[in-house]
Every structure is written in structure tokens, then in C-alpha cells.
Amino acid sequence: MRKLSLYLLLLCQGVFIYAQKHDSNTNNQIEQQIDRLLSQMTLEEKCLQMTNNAPGISRLDILPYNWWNESLHGVARNGKATVFPEPIALGATFDTELVYRVADAISDEARAKFNITQQAGNYSQYAGLTFWSPNVNIFRDPRWGRGMETYGEDPCLTSTLGVAFVKGMQGNHPLYLKTSACAKHYAVHSGPEALRHEFDAIPTTKDLYETYLPAFKALVTEGKVDAVMGAYNRVYGESASASQLLLIDILRKQWGFKGHVVTDCGALDDIHLYHKITESAVESAALAAKNGANLNCGTTYEHLPEAVKQGLVSESTIDSLLRPLLRTRIRLGILGEQSDNPYCHIGDSAICNPRHQDIAREAARKSMVLLQNKNALPLDNDIKTLFITGPFATDINVLLGNYYGLNDNCYTFLEGIVSCASPATTINYKQGIMPVTPNRNPIDWVTGEAAASDAVIVCLGISNLLEGEEGEAIASDYKGDRLSLELPQHQIDFLEKIYNYPNRKARVIVVLTGGSPILLDKIAQLSDAIVMAWYPGQAGGLALGDILFGKVSPSGKLPITFPVNEQQLPEYEDYSMKGRTYRYMTEKPMYPFGFGLTYSNIEIDDLRTNAERIKKGNGMTVTTRVKNVGEYKTDEVLQLYITLPDGEDNPLCSLKSFKRITLEPQEETSVTFDITPDMLTSITSKGETVMQSGKYKVFIGNCSPSARSAELGGVMAETTFVVK
């Protein structure tokens, strides 16, 4: 037996050494291949390979390649693909493993589509393998129209889910990439959309390192993300897409990033046209190249040969910038012969297959947040009459959000509800009102019949018509931003008319769509239940039906604070975190970060640490008892928050970890969290990371710790410990 064990040990060591040598040899071969290509390219050819629409070079067997592709929640803008929930909805799942599976499914479909399009000679935009996702900007202000693309307002949640997404996209092969993921928009970028091409974001140094950079650092150091995209705006006076501080000092020197940097599209033109940092496209190209931007989405780098001739940048700098781009293409299997690349054999059976559709439905279920329930939900299976109304009950746009794919398996809210209802239930549907503007016809055939039913489901909210990127939200007055967080007034009036209808019989259930907070004080007074459905993807209707009829208990949690009104918010253009997000907001919100009801009730208590005092540099564990005391099987998201000792404007509390668990009725369990030394550090005003001495508070609950959470029924256990 000993001989056999020794033999196996030696065999494993041999395999490990062989694998190391094989990987080393292969890496050497890649670098040699890059050297050969660089030595055979002209300066003009090199510079064109650094633009997103890179032309082919037939004599070098380099095919045309367009680097621009999108996959925020599914392969986007390239035909048939599974559409998963929008990232803000994925943030509401608080489910790291699920986000990994979503990204793994997306990258499988991406590979399949790429393999097929390559065989057809299709080298167009959105047909490649370099995906400019995920968006890990912090949703610092709910008025930002692109907040839907993010995982929310919290650095821990964003970092954790972002890393999972990157790993799912890029695969686990030691050499080859399934796809190339990209962390965007680096950095300090979250509106205003109308000013993004000229705006200068100036956060405090503490906010920069404590809030705006952690997710990018995590994706680089933990996720090994292949690409980072610079933002449009300036940061401390430098263009974010050509910043020595961001791209050289922090990204490459501090974090050791080895991948490539891509500019946001047209961002280098902004340097001379709007930021007025340079006087010409030639100077902008040279500045970006010297500060480490490898790839230009746009045409500014077509001026690089002239910049070299003028002595503004050297050809050796061009070579060093092109090298990571060639390395990415080789690792993707786009350059050279790679018969051993396992991802080159993924076929069309991966596209919209049943497994991916199931993941989309699971993700939509876990993302929807039950904000209010006055014994209105779940609906009884034998409910006799049900009325469905509202402008978004049959609107496919509210499933898709933005940066979406297309397929023939999308289920609207109406379709999903009908599919889950009993055949014995009488169901009626009328849209009732238009989404953005009031009805022109004053005749009302809806509110009376709706109020007379056993229950009415009113699908209200906002859509990609009102929020999004600067040119996409065609009904927005502010280029995609929402300077008012109210619903359109005619939607509120419509709901009020139903709720206050004389002798109303119906329970009024509001289903809200959107990718950002909505002011809900009035809505809460005019409804019996509120479900925040976000932009839930192709299976959104099915997931909503599952939740409304109690096939699953709702389990989503808010990844962003819902304020009572805009007066609670600091100035939109101010990038200080003071007063923003649950970490710094002293005003009482309408619905706090991390909040979300289920159909059951849980107890959380008996929180214990394994030490009452620890030394600086050490960590600890905390354990709490959790029991489902309700009647429904449910998922619950346990959230670990820590409050640091007073000093240097520390956050009120910060999410440090979370776990999603499933509990049967009356099931009890204990849950343990590891508190690492990193969780106990803070950032000084100079940007230094320190661990303070003093008393720390630790909370474990099903929402963020606050008086408002307690008012809404949130449960929380807390204790203290000392760092000396």
C-alpha cells in the first residue's frame, strides 16, 4: 500500500512538472510568435491593429477582427442568444455561484456563435470573442441612467459578482481563453450622461480607493480579467482613457495588470474636442499610447504613425502596446493553429439550449424583490377572477433592458402569469394606459372591472425608453438619466383610480419594472403588494408567475438604496460619497440596501465570535443561528456587515460577505463567516490602507443594519469585538 501511495505521489508530481514545462514552453512559443509578427509588420499595420476594427493582413495570415462585442447579460446585438436578467437584477440575487453559471452559459453561446460565424466568413462588429463586460462601476447615484448595467451601489457585492462573471466568461483553461472579459468603465464613472464627454470627476482620495476602485482591483487581481476599458470622463484632470495615474501607476504598477486596456468608443476624440487636454487627434493618440492604452475603440489611433514621425511617441512603445493584443488573439485561438484549444469545438447546440433557459428562469426568480406584502401574496391557485393591466404587461422591452440579444423564447408578464394560473381562473387583460404619456382617449373601460376582480396585477414602472445610455433612451429629457425618480404621473393616477375605486374588491398587486430606484411612497400607499421585477430577461414572465402563485418564495434583495425623494440625495455631479448609498446615508430611506421580503419568516440570533479580542493583522470567525419559523420553503440571503471604529469618515457600516441559503419550514441551521484581516481595514485620507485599534461591530442579518430595516421587518443579530 505504501509503495502504491508513493508511486501515485511521484506520478502526480511528474504530471504537475510536465504541465508546468508544457505551459512554459507554450508561453514561450506564443511570445516567439508575437515577435515574428511584430518584426514583419509595418508601422501603419501595427497602428491599425490597435483599432477596434482591425483589418486583415493576408501575407501574415491575420484575418480581419472587430474587437467590439457586448455580453452584459447574454451575447448582445448578434442575433439569437439566451437573454438573462439585467446586471442590476443579477446583483439582486446576491448569488455568486449563479452569476458564474450565467457567465459560463453566455461564454458557451459566444464561442458557438463565433465558431459558426468564422466558418461563414462573418467578421463584423459583435461577432468576435472580446466582450466589453462586466460593468463594475459603482451605482453611486440612482439618477444615473446606466446604473442598470451595474451590480449596484456596494463595492463588496460588485467585486464578488464581477469576479464570478469574469471567471465564467474566460473559462478555466491554463492557457486558452473561452472569451475575453473586460472590466469597465475604469474609473470613477457614473454620470451625468449628458456631460460624460467633458466631465471631470474629482473624488476624495479615500473615496477613490475605498469605493470606486475595489471592484476593478478585484477583477484584475482575483479574476485575472483580460481587458480593462477606460471611461469617457476625466479623473483629476486626466482623461480616464489616457491617464498615467489610472493606467500606469495604479493598474499596471500597483495591481500588476498584464492584459490590455481599451478606450471607450470615441473617448480619445474627447481628449482634444471636449476635454481640451490636447490640440489635435495626433497629440491625443500619442498621449493615450504613452499612458498605456493598447486598443482604441474609434479611429484616433490611425494618427499614431504621424505621432511617431513627429517624435511624440516611439515605435517601441507601439510594439509594447500591440503585444498584449496579439497575445489575447492567440489565447482566443484567432491567430495561429491551435488544434488543442478545447473551446474551438463548441457547436450550435450551446445556443439557447434548455439548460441555459432554465438558468435564465432561475436567475429571474432569484432577482425579483418583494418590497411590500399586506397578505396579498401568494395568490391562491383557485382564485376565481384575475385582472392584468398596465403598460408593461405585454412589453418585451422591459424583459430586455439594454445591451441585449434576441430569441423566440421571451415570455412577457402576461404570458407568464397566464401559464401559471389555473384553467378555472377567469383572466382578463387590458393595457389601460400608455407607458410614457397620458392617454388621449378619456374613456376608461379598465379600472372598474379591475377593481371588481379578486386580484388585479398592475404592471407599472420605467423602461429603456426612459433610462439608459446617452443615445438609447429615446423618451428621456436628460440623455438617459432620470433627474426625477418618480413614475410618470399618469401611471400613479391610474393606480390611484383602481385602488380608490368605490367598493373595490380586488387586492392590488403592483409589479414594477426598471433598472434603478423609483420613488415608492405613493405606490406603497396605493397597493397591497409590490414586486420589483427589474429587467428580468427572457424568462421574466415565467419567473413572475412562479412568484405570484407561490411556486417559489421571492428571495431577491435590493442591491441599491431606494430613497424617499430626491431631496435626500447629494448633488448629482458631486463625486464625494458623503450622504450616498447605505454606507454613508444618514437620511432614512424608503427601502434600504439588502432588503427584500419572502413568504416566510426567519429568526437570526446567538451571534458569536471565536475571540473577543484579536491583534492587528489577524482574522476571526463568526457564527449565528438561523431558523425558518414560517410555513414556506425559502431562500434567505444572510449578509455580514462590519462597522469600524470612529475615525476619518469611515462608512456607517459595510457589507463584507454574504451567503444565500435554503431553509425548509421550521428548519434551523448555523452559519459561519470568516472575517479576514482585509475586511477590518480602512482607507485614510491619503489613500493608505490601515487596520485601526478599537471596538468593531459585526452584524449578520437579512438586510443592511438600520432603523428603517427594523421597521420593515428585517432581522439582525449583532456583537462586538476589539482589535488591539
Image (cartoon, rainbow, N blue to C red):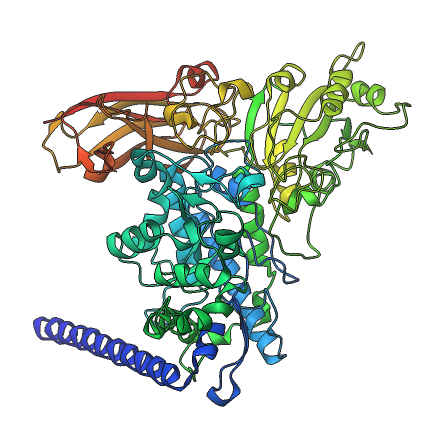
> Which one is in front, 191 or 158?
191
Evaluate whether residue 377 shows in this view. Answer: no
Quarter holding the N terminus?
bottom left
Q: Toward which corner of the image does residue 663 lie, by quadrant?
A: top left
Up/down of 91 relative to 218, above or below: above
Q: Position of residue 705 (x, y in %)?
A: 37, 22
In this picture, residue 267 sits left or right of residue 7: right
Evaluate whether residue 77 shows in this view. Answer: yes
> Which one is in front, 609 or 484?
484
Residue at the spot x=61%, y=18% of the render? Answer: 524
> Which one is in front, 210 or 230?
230
Residue lying furthest bottom: 59
In this picture, residue 342 sits left or right of residue 297: left
Residue at the spot x=61%, y=32% of the render? Answer: 482
Residue at the spot x=18%, y=76% of the render? Answer: 17
Up/down of 587 relative to 515, above or below: above
Residue lying furthest top: 502
Q: Where is residue 366 in the image (x, y as percent from the top left)?
A: 52, 39
Quarter holding the C terminus?
top left
